[in-house]
Amino acid sequence: MRTFQESLNLTHKPTALIEEFLSQQPEHINLINVEKHQPHFKMGDLIWETTQGVKAVEVKIQTTHYTSLFLETRSNVERNTPGFMATSQADLFINYSTHSGSGIIIPFKALFNWLAQNLQKLPTRQARTRVGVEYYTSEGRIAPLEALALIPGARVFYKPLVEIPV
């Protein structure tokens, strides 16, 4: 089991890859990594200025092979705190797999609505994270990628993880 800090460190290169990917999109103007400036910013992890306006982006990184996503509904079961699906005010959700080099971009509101409509059909799972000598438990629903790719506005992309200077 990884510590919280080890998990954070694993996300730096993939997040840089997502930043690079977004900056190559035709609508791109500017990109700010909010995590570097203000951790736990409720608007998301990235602020992406585009020709269509400013978009807050929630980024999640998967370091193992997956065919489903963990959509966090409670970030800390022991303290009963809501997960990112309830607290994020992002416009876009991006999940990237370092294993497959693929990702999915979904309008956050559409993802939230889809989860609300399908909540009872999706299995609940928990994940434990170590912080120092203590642990906390996150809880979420397991959503198949095939179903998420059908959400209106969803887009799957492929960008293999290569060495990116961070």
Image (tube, grey):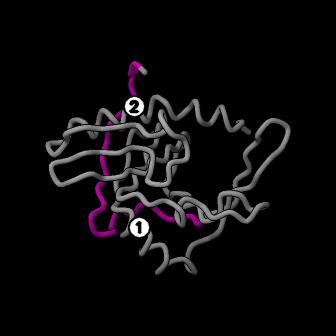
Q: Is label 1 in a helix, a strand or a loop?
A: helix
Q: Amino acid at mark 1?
A: Leu
The quarter of the image holding the N terminus is: top right
Residue 27: % across, % down: 16, 46
Q: Is residue 149 left or right of residue 77?
A: left
- Residue, x 56% and y 58% (percent of image)? 70
- Residue, x 74% and y 55% (percent of image)? 137
Q: Nearer the viewer, residue 14 or 133?
A: 133
| Mark closest to the chain's N terminus, 2 or 1 | 2
The picture quadrant where one finds residue 8 is top right
Q: Amino acid at mark 2?
A: Ala
Q: Within the magenta stretch, is there residue 42? A: no
Residue 75: % across, % down: 65, 58
Quote the CA–CA distance across marks 2 and 1: 23 Å
Q: Which mark is residue 111?
A: 1
Q: Is residue 148 left or right of residue 48?
A: right
> Which region of the structure is painted magenta?
141-165
Q: Nearer the viewer, residue 52 or 72?
A: 52
Height in image: 111 above or below 24? below
